Image (cartoon, coloured by chain):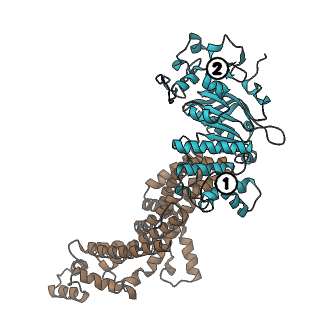
Chain colours: A cyan, B brown
Amino acid sequence: MEAVSPATVDWDEMTDTILEVENLKTYFFIEQGIVRAVDGVSFTLQAGKTLGIVGESGCGKSVTSRTIMRLLSPSLARIVDGSILYYPVKGEPIDLAQLDPFGEQIRDIRGNEIAMIFQEPMTSLNPVYSVGHQIMEAILLHQEVTKEEARKQAVEMLRLVGIPLPEQRVDQYPHQFSGGMRQRAMIAMALSCNPRILIADEPTTALDVTIEAQILDLIQQIQADSEMALIMITHDLNVIGEVADHVIVMYLGQVVESAPVDEIFDAPKHPYTQGLLNSLPMIGREERLEPITGSVPGPHERPQGCAFAPRCPHVMNRCRLEEPPSLIAGEFSTVACWLYDEQTEVVYAPG
Amino acid sequence: MTTFIIRRLLSAVVTFFLITLISFVVIQLPPGDVVSNWVRQQEASTGQPLPPETIENLRRTYGFDEPIIVQYFKWIDGFPSGDFGFSIEYSNAPVSEILAQRTGLTIFLGVATLFISWGLAIPFGIYAATHKNSHWDYLLSTLSFIGISTPNFLVAVIYLFIAVFVLKTDYSGGLFSQEFKNAPWTWERLLDFAKHLPIPLAILGLGGMAGTFRIMRANLLDILDQQFIEAARAKGLKERIVIYKHATRIAINPLISRVGMQLPFLISGTIIISIVLDLPTLGPPFIRALNRQDMFLAGTVLMILAFTLLVGNLLADIVLAWSDPRIQYD
């Protein structure tokens, strides 16, 4: 087999590829030095499918999503390498990484073809405009409709996401909504222009478990009705198990393991993925929880060799010296770990 | 909303009368009164003591022998008919006559200063916040530090020095040339007034502008960090709309409450600068009245200050209630 990157490892045979991220590197240039927040991330997203991105805080999950949306301030963060190919319904693929972050082209895609919901429903809505106004704002921006039609659509969206009495709720302000209601309103806003991709950045982290289940159900139901692709970013493996088709596990800005969701849970390969699963409390579990020792190193304390080596229970001498490349581990999976070096060939070395 | 305004108005009226009572009493608290001050002055100029009967007579004529509370009610009794008492310092002239034009000019100066300092500070604040850590941001922030730490009367003195000794102009302060000082309003007088206005306005506006700029910059930076700003950008809105419609609209709210406080501060702030620049505002007679315990004059000026504070706060609350839906009316 010839050397190719994981992004082109034939997952796209199954369905239509809608987004293809390859060797993406987003670095922050701050006074204290360069922070390699996203350091060679590759993945492919298919229409109607869900990609889960997991990892602890500070692993570059949110920066990845904001890089795709081009929401990062160009004075702080720069895409130093890689591409983000978006495949529109018609025409040539667009490399989002090459667009002007304030330009018209990305603004036409943002909120229209790729929408996003955020972690903090309490602060994701502007407190001084009514919920309806904020939903209508997106509709009026991307669709050629009158204000009355936009308002009707906003009411319908609120009804769709399960907000009772949407005709009255549409004129209310965010502070009159509960946390779960606000996240529903955010989803209504994000879905108002029928996006082809929805990026959900820890959408349920700030919510109660009962509300969490409702919100996840809602997202899945909408996805089933609309062929929308979903990128679910979370640190919670339970959420991943619930919604994802394919999972990438991130550690310090890099993808350490990429596999279908069943493989991640049944046969995790990377010691970090194993560690995440072992620290997951589950009903009926007999053995003790085994948390991963230590914590994610700070952005300036990046270890030499494998970034996970200082916390890894299977660490070898080689790990401390050489950075492991992404190795093919199965039909649809890769893992970046020296433990699997003997069994597979090197397909991709992070540049 | 209407009940909110009515309730605020009623409480403002009560507060207003409490303020007049307190200021009237406080002015009389130090030993002596306006008569003893006047007597001392007379004795100093003639070199002979006034007979005690004359002094007693004076007190009786003016009603100063009665209890303070009676004097107070006699004083406020005249308010509805525009009678605010008289000033012994100004040869028994009615207070309303002394203050009429000065009040108008003072409020005009205060409001004009406010408009100018806001009109400049807010755009500068927005620019500095959206270009954080740029050269212009550093420059504006440094200038605002200087502006905020320099008392404006000092700026006035420096300006006078430069105008007279360095630039050799004949600038002598004031708001009118000599020939228009007591003239009725005509086009010529208005023109003359407009010519005199820029320098006091610039000096008065400086301090307030620096403070407003700093608040605007800090508020906007705070808001720009909020999640809903990123959410607005994620909708695909233009950066300009994100900044103005979503961020500035909220960042400006604390400035609205500031304006209620700033109005009387601007008016009392004109006191010292008015003496330096010889401006016909409330400042000079107020200082004179306080020195001599001329309580009707001093009390009336205090009352005007309190009135502007109340009106300013009332307006600020109403505008804020309208601009921020999170504020409850009832």
**Please, what is the three-letter code of the amino acid marked with disc 2?**
Ala
In which quadrant of the rendered image does the N terminus of chain A lie? Answer: top right
* Residue in view at x 76 percent, y 18 percent: A3
* Residue in view at x 68 percent, y 45 percent: A222
Is label 1 in a helix, a strand or a loop?
helix
- The residues bearing labels 2 and 1 have C-alpha atoms spaced at a distance of 42 Å
Identify which residue, B82 or A155, lies in the foreground: A155
Which mark, residue A336? 2
Q: Position of residue B70 (x, y in %)?
A: 24, 83
Identify which residue, A305 or A191, lies in the foreground: A191
Q: Chain of mark 1?
A: A
Q: Position of residue A263 (x, y in %)?
A: 65, 24
Q: Residue furthest front?
A: A284
Asked whether residue B296 is in view, the answer is: yes
Identify which residue, A202 or B33, lies in the foreground: A202
| Residue A15 falls in image quadrant | top right
Would residue B166 be found to the left or right of residue A217 on screen?
A: left
Which mark, residue A157? 1
In this rendering, the answer to whether A199 lies above or below A286 is below
In which quadrant of the rendered image does the C terminus of chain A lie? Answer: top right
Please state which of the two labelled residues, at mark 2 or mark 1, is closer to the viewer: 1
Would residue B114 be found to the left or right of residue B231 on screen?
A: left
Identify which residue, B209 or A42, lies in the foreground: A42
